[in-house]
Image (spheres, coloured by chain):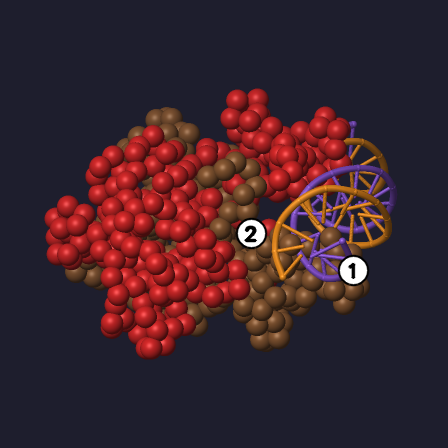
Chain colours: A red, B brown, C orange, D purple
Amino acid sequence: MKEKKNTETVYVSVAQEIERRIKEGIYVSSQKLPSEYDLSTEFECSRLTIRKAIDLLIKKNIIVKKRGKGSYVMSQQKIQSGRDGLQGFTEAAKAYGKTSDTKVISFEKIKQLDDKIMTQLELSESDTVYELVRCRSLDNEPMTIEKIYLSEKYVDGLSKEDFNQSLFKLIESKVEIAYSHQEIEAILVNEEMAELLNVPVGDPLLLVNSITFAINATPILYDISYYRADRYTFKNTLVRGNNEGEDR
Amino acid sequence: MKEKKNTETVYVSVAQEIERRIKEGIYVSSQKLPSEYDLSTEFECSRLTIRKAIDLLIKKNIIVKKRGKGSYVMSQQKIQSGRDGLQGFTEAAKAYGKTSDTKVISFEKIKQLDDKIMTQLELSESDTVYELVRCRSLDNEPMTIEKIYLSEKYVDGLSKEDFNQSLFKLIESKVEIAYSHQEIEAILVNEEMAELLNVPVGDPLLLVNSITFAINATPILYDISYYRADRYTFKNTLVRGNNEGEDR
DNA sequence: GTTTATTTGTTCGTATGTATT
DNA sequence: AAATACATACGAACAAATAAA
């Protein structure tokens, strides 16, 4: 173990400082930031380093740039599901100052699984698949039910109780998680879900299907999540294209 | 306005070539790309240029990188609402090989507008606001109803017929659009929407509220869109954080 | 209306650090 | 321990968009 901890990379710490100034109100929304050149002088680093720092903040949807004009602080800053990537539930709970809780409802071997899911997981009929059903609550109010399907090899040796904690942490000891594709749609609650989520039948739900992959594009798990629509929304920021590729 | 074609920037054309190879199947999903060094040799440019090209493809969710390992082609490539930023409807239509169509239902001055919306648009009671209601169809099937609220100054001199085309194009002649915040939720269809969208009352809908801003963080328009849930889903890709800033 | 200054965008070259195999 | 590959950082230069003189 070497203790070069603080290293912090210049551009990350510059980004943090700029972000701090925005939060402090030193750089106000709708105000132009100092130019890259000025910032590089102030922070005593190269302009490219400033650019990298600003790129970070653009990725975080805090800043927008315009060629020939300058960099601007973006209006507001919302909590976005998915902004920091996967695993947003517990985070979001923290951000709203709520307690979060995960309960395992069932965990069992599945004999017959939907063909579409099997195909997407790149499994054949001979493979054994497990189904994990969990209920996640905010402030003890059930918010979402998730059904997760994963191949035997990722849950080998694990039992029901192990899944009360972060699923990703468990799986990442076996394989590295890289990204996931998700699809959001709206449906009506059925009896099964109505009971689990404690809402009346006929209420709308947000249904989120997602497939999670490892770095080498191997599908790891298929997740079907049902969110109470009256308590949960997905937030998002779209930035007007920089016209890189094609026209629109 | 001249239409500058590609080739001008090295890293963009490199990115396009790499993307082409992925589409052609030369670089297969789950396969590692050549190293940045090898690519820079092949394309006869600096490694930084390759990195910028790859950064572009990462932003497009086509590639994922892992420090010390390499760059990998991401599995699949889905059409994402919002991938190219705002104004996805017509694009998405094209991608699915469908015809799209926009009809103006109404366009009129509003006297009393919801306080929340007025606040978000940073307008006072004395300001005049217009409401534009449009219906957008795919293959002549109504898909979404959008209610758009904007200040008088952006629609000055325009009449109902002008809005059958792209709203953004119209507005961008007056002010430059930079980004928008959106929020997705699920609701049940009411009678008004049921009729306009031609679906039974009680069906679920995707409700998308969005605020669009100019570069200087001035809110331009407030958009409330209702999407038929049985025909429309939002797709998204979440990438596992690179642990840049804080911990999570 | 043309020129000039400012500001971001792109690209090269070079060097060193860090993670993985 | 060594080779490979990505990450960070510096300096320098010119291009292109924008706004001001």
Amino acid type at circle 1 is Cys
Density class for disc 1 (Cα within 10 Å; few <14, some 14-19, many ≥20) is some
Residue in the image at 21% along x and 39% along y: A141
Compare residues A55 and A237 and report the one nearer the observer: A55
Residue in the image at 76% along x and 67% along y: B42
| Location of residue B50 (image quadrant) | bottom right
Subunit that carries the residue with mark 2: A
| Lateral position of residue A86 relative to residue B53, left or right | left
Subunit that carries the residue with mark 1: B
Q: Give coordinates of residue A232: x percent, y percent.
A: 29, 43
Residue in the image at 65% along x and 38% along y: A2
Q: Give coordinates of residue B221: x percent, y percent.
A: 42, 41
Spatial distance from mark 1 to mark 2, Cα to Cα?
26 Å
Residue in the image at 56% along x and 65% along y: B73
Q: Give coordinates of residue B94: x percent, y percent.
A: 46, 68
User: The N terminus of chain A is located in which quarter?
Assistant: top right
Q: Nearer the viewer, mark 1 or mark 2?
A: 1
Amino acid type at circle 2 is Gly
Q: Which mark is residue B45?
A: 1
Task: Name the residue tied to disc 2.
Answer: A241
Compare residues B154 and A235 and report the one nearer the observer: A235
Residue B214 in sight: no
Q: Secondary structure at mark 2?
A: loop
User: The C terminus of chain A is located in which quarter?
Assistant: bottom right
Q: Which mark is residue A240?
A: none
